[in-house]
Structure formats: structure tokens, C-alpha cells
Image: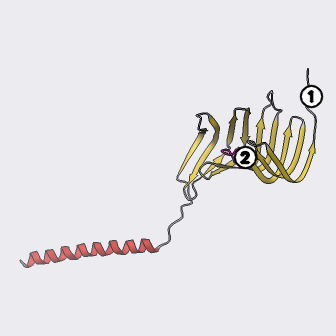
Amino acid sequence: MRLIVLIALSAGLALGSFWLVEVMQRKTEDSLPARVRTEPDFYVEKFNFVRMAKTGEARYNLTGTEMKHYPQDDSYQIQNPVMHSYSADRPPMVSRSLRAKVTNNSSEVHMYDNVHIDRPASAKSQHFQLKTSYLLILPDEDVMKTPKPVELQLGKSTLNGAGMFVNNATGEFSLSSNVKGQYQPPVVTN
């Protein structure tokens, strides 16, 4: 009988010890500050992301050599991004840079370092090029903006300045400072 009481008492002490350790660990974990995760939780190499319009047509596609997702701010870092923007009334526009960051549920594309945009000539528009060091593209709103200096070329005309805002949906365009340009009228052929 003593042996049974001794075993039961030992088992009760062991279970009580385990319970006490669990309670202490929970209190310690609750009192410690949450660890901020700074490493990406996944990455993809040689990807192609396509954003569709409500009509089922492609609005834009974004490719790159590497994409990393950072969970702390739900952003994507992209190496060598190339973005093709599609519109029914103008030729596709191709945007390139050395790196990009996609934020705000993929509604903001921040392009950095050697940003170059190119739109080929068509029956309705001349060849267009843009060069800058940083560009924010809002593809759902059809807006591009930058506080940095830009170099624009439309056909043979050039325009340089800083603080650009473009709304392709409304046709609004502005440069806020250091604006210089050279206009060459388009060549009309009969």
C-alpha cells in the first residue's frame, strides 16, 4: 500500500511540475516582445505575374529574374523587373529597371535604378521613351509619378525636368521643376 501511495504521490508531483513549467513558459512568451521577421518567407526565380482586368483581359504582366516576399509588410522585392502595360487605345508600354518593390496589395510598383520606359510608335502616337532613377507606377489607376529628374522623348521632341506626374486615364501630365524641352514637329507624309 505504501508503494502505491508513493507512486501516486510521485506521479502527482511529476504532473504538477510539467504543468508549472508550461504555465511559466506561456507567461515568459507573453511578456517577451514579438520577434520581427526580417527574412523573406519565400522566393521565386524567373517568374511571370499577370494582373487581369474585370473584363478578363490582361492589364499588365510583371516578370523578373527573382522575387522575394517579405511578410512583415507584405511586400515583394524584384530583381530585373520588366512590366508590360496593356491598353486598348495605345500600344503596350514596357517598363524596366534594375530592381522594384511591389506594395499595397500589388497596387503600387516602385521601380528603382536605371528606370526605362518604352512605347513603340503606332498609327495614333509617336515613339515614347522615359528615363529616370525612380518611378512609382499605380497600374490600377494608370498613374506614374516621381520626384526625381526625368528625361522624356516623344518622337524627336525631348523634355527634361523633375517632379513628374502622369495620369494616362485622364491625359494629365506635369513636371514641377527644372523643365527644359526641345520640340520637333512630327514629319507629315502624304
Q: In the image as oriented, which residue stretches furthest toward the left?
A: 1
Q: Which disc is residue 187 wearing? A: 1
Identify which residue is drawn at 66% across, 46% down.
Answer: 79
Element carrying mark 1: loop
Q: Where, quadrant-wise, is the N terminus in this rendering? A: bottom left
Q: In the image as oriented, which residue stretches furthest toward the front?
A: 170
Q: Position of residue 47 (x, y in %)?
A: 59, 40
Q: Which disc is residue 147 wearing? A: none
Q: Position of residue 142 (x, y in %)?
A: 71, 44
Q: Is residue 79 magenta?
A: no
| Amino acid found under the numbered disc labelled 1 | Val
| Residue 80 sits in quarter | top right
Identify which residue is drawn at 33% across, 74% down.
Answer: 21
Circle 2 Cα neighbour tier, 10 Å, few/some/many (<14 / 14–19 / ≥20): some
**CA gap, disc 1 and disc 2:** 29 Å
| Residue 22 sits in quarter | bottom left
Residue 55 placement, left or right of 85: left
Question: What residue is shown with label 2?
Answer: 143
Identify which residue is drawn at 18% across, 76% down.
Answer: 10
Q: Position of residue 170 (x, y in %)?
A: 76, 43
| Amino acid found under the numbered disc labelled 2 | Val
Residue 182 placement, left or right of 99: right
- Looking at the rendering, the stretch of residues picked out in magenta corresponds to 135-141
Mark 2 or mark 1, which is nearer the start of the sequence?
2
Compared to residue 59, the image places residue 32 above or below, namely below
Q: Where, quadrant-wise, is the C terminus in this rendering? A: top right
Circle 1 Cα neighbour tier, 10 Å, few/some/many (<14 / 14–19 / ≥20): few
Q: Are marks 1 and 2 in contact (CB under 8 Å)?
A: no
Q: How many marks?
A: 2
Element carrying mark 2: strand
Q: Position of residue 83 (x, y in %)?
A: 68, 40
